[in-house]
Image (cartoon, rainbow, N blue to C red):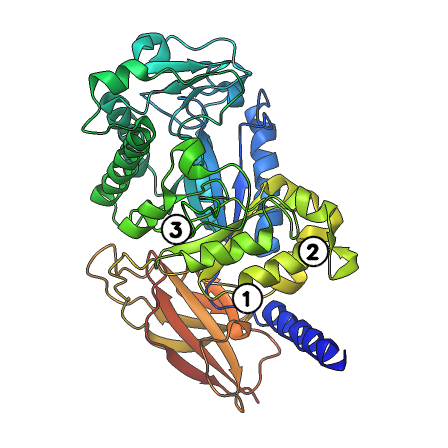
Amino acid sequence: MKRVITVIFLLSLTVCTFCQTAPKREFRGAWIQAVNHQFEGIPAKELKAELTSQIESLSSCGINTIMFQVRVEGDALYKSDIEPWSAFLTGRQGLEPDEDWDPLQFMLELCHNHGMELHAWINPFRAKTVSTEELALAHQMSMHPERFVRYGKLALFNPALKENRDYICSIAADIVRRYDIDGFHIDDYFYPYPEDGLKFNDDADFIRDPRGFRNKDDWRRDNVNLFVEQLADTIRSIKPWVKFGISPFGIYRNKTEEYPDGSATNGFENYSGLYADVLYWLEQRWMDYCIPQLYWNVSYRIADYQELVNWWADHAYGCLMYIGQDVERTVKEKDPNNASQHQERLKMDLQRGRSELAGSCHWPAKSVVDNPGAYRDVLAKEYYATPALQPLPSRMALERPGKVRKLRIIPTVDGNVLYWTAPAGHSEEDRACKYVVYKFSEKETIDTEDASHIAGIVDNVYFRMDSADKDCIYVVTALSRVQAESKPVKIRCHVK
């Protein structure tokens, strides 16, 4: 018994270490969705204020990436010459906002001003949600009804049709070309989540063009594979620094005699239910990052969070792997090891406990802001208390910027300011876009891998020093578009 108690105590110390020692590079994302109607019909002035409030709250608790939904059902929450304005923005599809503004551009500038990345998030194949009654004349389904499949009250772009795959990639290309986004993101809807008694009617398509497949399930998976590969190629051909990521359903395949490499779960699967062969995409390196939606809790019988965290960590294949966290479910369930608290700390520690996992994305962002069970407070005070740079995608060349030049301290009437000159860049990939300022005491070893020494991450070539500074050392590095870091330059601060 004493040995068991000792092991538990040591494990608890390890868990504390995970939460206290924050990694220098970590994805800390949140999804801001439109599909829940939170924007619908709100005047532009009020919506801008609401979005600004959310971003300020998220930024102040350490979130460094926003996934902003800009396409719900073949529509647009941005200025588009291709698809109609979204009913989830204006209240009626095709109706322009009450003010001349572009929500995506607004969010881009807002996030960048707060030092956050913005990833444009689309739903690729959904063409009509259950709640939508009327489609605009400019909607693709109004113009080409033969390219769509109705499924109950839903309608979907038929994934079997090349013209649909080409069309969706053209939407992505338009967004990537016209907006200075940091990432492009799609969610888990490929083929629809099945409903009892409903059939997805693609028999004629399979008969017409089986492409050598005898099994329709394999053919459907190949339809999605073709799309994911084409989308990845489309984005990279336009702006190779834009990261491409997918957030699949949380179970790839359950462990069975037929498939012993699956997770020890017993739930709905990507592979057989949505025809999404996520493991194949990972092996092919089509994604820069993957965010499986692990919205269940630890000890949930059908799909245990801990089991799935470890399964996805074991199957990252060198891709950046993040964990999708559900705020509301997390705070409703007690920690099985500590009944006095909910499962947030347990889940975050399990995620950080695997080196193959490089961060979390929180669903939905509004719940983080609302702070149920002090969820946001825990992030701000414990897990995200120090800044974090973005993880580095393995696909990219990761050209480092040159070192900053002419680092100096200049006295001003408002105190000392650290100034430097930007390094020369040769391309967009190695251009200095941000700078990291580290601060050390004279007695400390300079270790720029220790995030606790990051005094700030700035866009400008100056940094206002602490008025209480006496004898210390400042270190400045430059960051590229994807946050590859230059070699450091240091300067000593002596104040009498």
Numbered mark located on residue 327 in the image: none
At x 65% / y 64%, what residue is drawn?
382
Left/right placement of residue 432 relative to residue 260 reads: left
* Residue 53 lies in quadrant: top right
Residue bearing mark 3: 289
Image quarter where the N terminus lies is: bottom right
**As displayed, is residue 322 above or below residue 479?**
above
Q: Nearer the viewer, residue 384 or 271?
A: 271
Residue bearing mark 1: 353
Image quarter where the C terminus lies is: bottom right
Image coords of residue 315 (percent x, y): 40, 56
Contact check, label 2 and label 1, Cβ < 8 Å: no
Q: In the rendered structure, which disc, 2 or 1, sits on the residue that comes first in sequence? A: 1
Q: Secondary structure at mark 1?
A: loop
Q: Nearer the viewer, residue 76 or 152?
A: 152
**As displayed, is residue 407 above or below residue 81?**
below
At x 44% / y 45%, what residue is drawn?
118
Residue bearing mark 2: 377
Q: Nearer the viewer, residue 209 or 445?
A: 209
Q: In the rendered structure, which disc, 3 or 2, sits on the residue that comes first in sequence? A: 3
Q: Nearer the viewer, residue 317 or 258?
A: 258
Q: CA distance from mark 2 to mark 1?
A: 21 Å
Contact check, label 3 and label 2, Cβ < 8 Å: no
